[in-house]
Amino acid sequence: MTQEPDFWVLEYVTITKDPRTGLVVAIGGTEQAADLLQRAGGFLSAAGPRGDYHRLPHGLPVEQQRLKATAAAHALATAGHSVHLDPALNMLATPDGEREAALRYVAKLAERVATAETSSEVAEVLAEVASPIHGLLPLTREVIVRAWITASDLQNSEPGKEPEPIARLGNTTDSLLRAAHTVLRARNHIARTAQQPATAPPPGLRTPPSTSRTHGHG
């Protein structure tokens, strides 16, 4: 029997944000890692129910949390330590990176529907586009709605008296809502059709067309 290799799990450092307390904590690591956490990130040693861990001070603004966590993770990685940094704390996760991820997501949907081999696969992609809460069209509509409201406020426009281009922006939200409903209806129809059983008669009951025509003129 092949013996499993030994991994020193405690040498791995995980830096994340505790959802209950809102504190940024670092779990695991050696004494050398602890030194780097304290010097590079300003982490404090704390006693926990399962042993010591590190955390950032209470009351730090979110950007300071991200800055210190990223600096600590970078120092650990540079020194050869294995470290996992929560993406929400990573200062290097730029908006451009999020935009690239969004573009890849949309391109993947187009690829999925172009190579679909069943109606169910097509319905799944359309659900991604038009589902009421997380669909692409409803989310896009939400962006346009917020842009319309904000633009009207910034120009001190009263409701219903916005400049013509901004008013048209508001009208676009209705078009997006109708488009989402149309896509969702199509998705539901395709999904129902995909679930219907075949209604063709058994092979033994089929009558060849040529036979029926021959006997019709006996």
Image (spheres, rainbow, N blue to C red):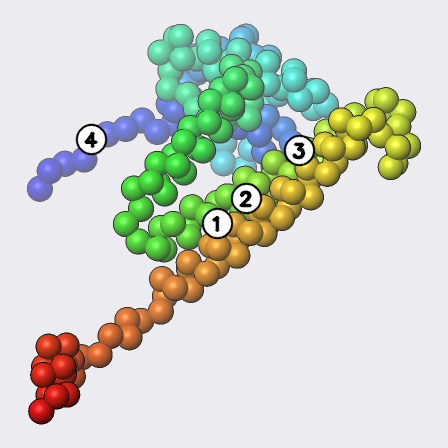
* Res. 127 mark: 1
Question: Which residue position is annotated with label 3?
Answer: 143
Q: Nearer the viewer, residue 172 or 156?
A: 172
Q: CA distance from mark 1 to mark 4?
A: 45 Å
- Total numbered labels: 4
Regarding mark 1 in the picture, which secondary structure is present there?
helix
Q: Position of residue 62 (x, y in %)?
A: 66, 22
Regarding mark 4 in the picture, which secondary structure is present there?
loop
* Res. 135 mark: 2
Asked if one can make out residue 131 in the rendered structure from this viewpoint, the answer is no
Q: Nearer the viewer, residue 142 or 184?
A: 184
Asked if one can make out residue 18 in the rendered structure from this viewpoint, the answer is yes
Q: Are marks 2 and 1 in contact (CB under 8 Å)?
A: yes
Graded by Cα atoms within 10 Å as few (under 14), some (14 to 19) or many (20 or more), the crowding at tag 3 reads: few
Q: Position of residue 69 (x, y in %)?
A: 55, 17
The tag earlier along the polypeptide, 1 or 3, is 1
Question: Which residue position is annotated with label 4?
Answer: 5
The tag earlier along the polypeptide, 1 or 4, is 4
Quarter of the rendering occupied by the N terminus: top left
Quarter of the rendering occupied by the C terminus: bottom left
Q: Position of residue 100 (x, y in %)?
A: 47, 22
User: Residue 205's image quarter?
Assistant: bottom left
Q: Is residue 181 above or below residue 63?
A: below
Q: Nearer the viewer, residue 205 or 185?
A: 205
Q: CA distance from mark 1 to mark 3?
A: 19 Å
Q: Name the residue located 45 percent from the left edge and 33 percent from the top edge.
A: 106
Graded by Cα atoms within 10 Å as few (under 14), some (14 to 19) or many (20 or more), the crowding at tag 1 reads: many
Q: Are marks 1 and 4 in contact (CB under 8 Å)?
A: no
